[in-house]
Image (cartoon, helix red, strand yellow):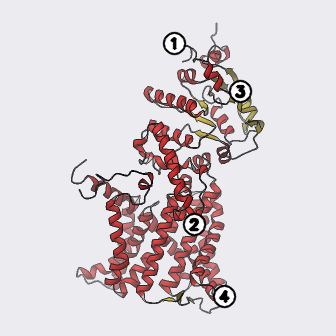
Amino acid sequence: MIYRETGQFRTSYAEDQAIFRLRQDKIGIAVILAIAWVGIPLLADEYLLRAILIPFLILSVGAIGLNLLLGYCGQISLGTGAFMAIGAYAAYNLALRVPALPLLLDFFLAGLIAAAVGVLFGLPSLRIKGLYLAVATLAAQFFADWAFLRVPWFTNYTPSGSVTAPALDFFGWVVDTPLEKYWLCLAFACLTAILAKNLVRSRIGRSWMAIRDMDIAAEIIGIRPMTAKLSAFAVSSFVAGGAGVLWAFVHLGSWEPLAFSIDMSFRLLFMVIIGGMGSILGSFLGAAFITVLPIFLNQAPALVGIQLSTAMVSHLEFMIFGALIVLFLIWEPHGLARLWQIGKEKMRLWPFPY
Amino acid sequence: MLATAPPRPAPPATPQRRRAIGEVLLAVENISLRFGGVRALTDVSFDIRKGEIRAIIGPNGAGKSSMLNVINGFYHPQEGRIVWKGRVLPRMRPHEAAAGGIARTFQNIALFKGMSTLDNIMTGRILKMRASFIEQALWIGRGRSEELRERAFVERLLDFLEITHIRHTPVGKLPYGLQKRVELARALAMEPELLLLDEPMAGMNLEEKEDMCRFILDVNEEFGTTVALIEHDMSVVMDISDRVVVLDYGKLLADGTPDQVRNDPAVIAAYLGVAHG
């Protein structure tokens, strides 16, 4: 009854092409943004910000990056962690070796470097598809793992291989409290989401989706497969690189190559699959599911008053988490975003059957 | 099929129609295409004139689809050449053919299943869009204005093909006949000079076929688009085409107006077999 488009007429194509078409959607997103920017900072404690919200936002950015490549362009990548690592180490080395550069420019250049490496590892996609491509991108992952572990120049010859990010100083605004870090990550997440949404509803996004859905037909209407695929790799790696910078500089502070291992790639892949391939909203939902659910599962036994040993809890956490992922993929292979879509359709009609 | 069809009047060769058909737009000359030992096409030559509807017919496996694939760059013939608007085309990729003004639809529908009708047709406008990456990402300047401009163009096409009601529907959910129409719309969105249709009416019922015939004729007349189509329904072919090419076993069997082709003994033999005794 409430979620209705009745009486809302769109009288121009511009209105019809808006991201949020319905008044209810506009109100909804305004409320969410208000909660995120003002409500949460007022209410959340340090633990919530540091352990849940900041990682959630950064991983959302990473998931958007992978979603552009996998969900929109249909190119499977298992190397997202590698591109994050490249972003992180590029920003570290730029800050270390070219101290004159402002930090924001460092971040941007680090993204560009990640994009360049992404294009390089995207080249096999011109010849191979599907699982074979996944294996080829896996090479990026192993290469990055190896390079940052074995080439001491990247880690500035620290004996342990662990490096520490410089202070987060943006033109005099030093970001050091969890709240400021949260705002910073939120700003990046909002910006990424808007830019990504604009891209996917433009020519470039359509050419990605055309390649994803049927590459032969895409070529027939004048899309160059090479340009489409490599641009998807570039943009995706740029965003992933940015997420890597945030993960290293804002979330971890000091890190070692293991922080961006294949585990990270898989986590992002799960986020995209569970959240919904080809959906920006899905990237956020997937990131929330993967970051929050384990913490919830960890706390749940204590909350309902069941006393279990710590080892038991952590084993249970893995088992339930795994089972949920499997079940979820059986029930709704198109992810949380599709569930939301179906829910919206139902709400339009409720309480009538049709 | 051919012989049982009731005698029908030849397409009205009105003076306007004659005048509308112009010079040679595309000529295939002595095309031979082989896949290993299989000869798909042998020494085939014909031309397509500007503004006409040209049908390519022939029994299954005659090389009709291979011919279209040669024209728009999917296959590269071992011998022969293609002359497009008076220029010999170099070996090219399909997207280069698209940029040159050749559009096509497929025998099996080749739509982008995950996208809406609108987005599918909008992809046909990709070659008309020039917005830079930054403009697209920020939805400013040409990024926004081109989207609106092309949307208006696509809406006119939707209107023309009578599919406005399904503009936001994902094409995977559409019935077959409508999918075929969306595919035609996507090809038309390219504003091609030459439109290649590979069995546009396959698997349609009579009403859908009639609709599709009407659309093809309208496209030809209103936009002046040259059409080359492959079709198995002889009544359709004889009704709407100006000239017909007949292929059999990869060889050119006949070439002429529907009436000439209909009465060609070689064509009758290929389709119906030769009477013995």
Query: Which of labels 1 and 2 is toward the front?
Result: 2
Q: Have a look at marks 1 and 2 and say if they share a chain.
A: no
User: On the picture, is B85 further left or further right than B127?
Assistant: right
- Which comes before the other along the chain, label 3 or label 1? 1
Decide: few, some or many residues near mark 3? Use Cα within 10 Å; few <14, some 14-19, many ≥20. Answer: many
Decide: few, some or many residues near mark 1? Use Cα within 10 Å; few <14, some 14-19, many ≥20. Answer: few
Find the distance from the CA under tag 3 to the CA under tag 2.
Answer: 49 Å
Instruction: Identify residue type, mark 2.
Output: Val
Q: Which mark is residue B6?
A: 1
Using the image, name the chain to which the residue with label 2 belongs: A
Q: Quadrant of the image for the C terminus of chain B?
A: top right
Instruction: Identify residue type, mark 1.
Output: Pro
Q: Which residue is mark 2?
A: A235
Instruction: Identify residue type, mark 3.
Output: Lys
- Which comes before the other along the chain, label 4 or label 2? 4
Q: Measuring from the top left, give residue B193's x and y in whole percent.
A: 64, 37
Residue B78 visible here: no
Q: Which residue is mark 3?
A: B251
Name the residue: 53% across, 33% down. B200
Q: Which residue is mark 4?
A: A97
Q: Have a look at marks 3 and 4 and say if they share a chain.
A: no
Residue farthest to the top? Answer: B277
Q: Is residue A33 above or below residue B137?
A: below
Decide: few, some or many residues near mark 2? Use Cα within 10 Å; few <14, some 14-19, many ≥20. Answer: many
Could you say which is closer to the camera, residue B53 or residue A216? B53
Query: Which of labels 1 and 4 is toward the front?
Result: 4
Find the distance from the CA under tag 3 to the CA under tag 4.
Answer: 70 Å
Q: Quadrant of the image for the N terminus of chain B?
A: top right
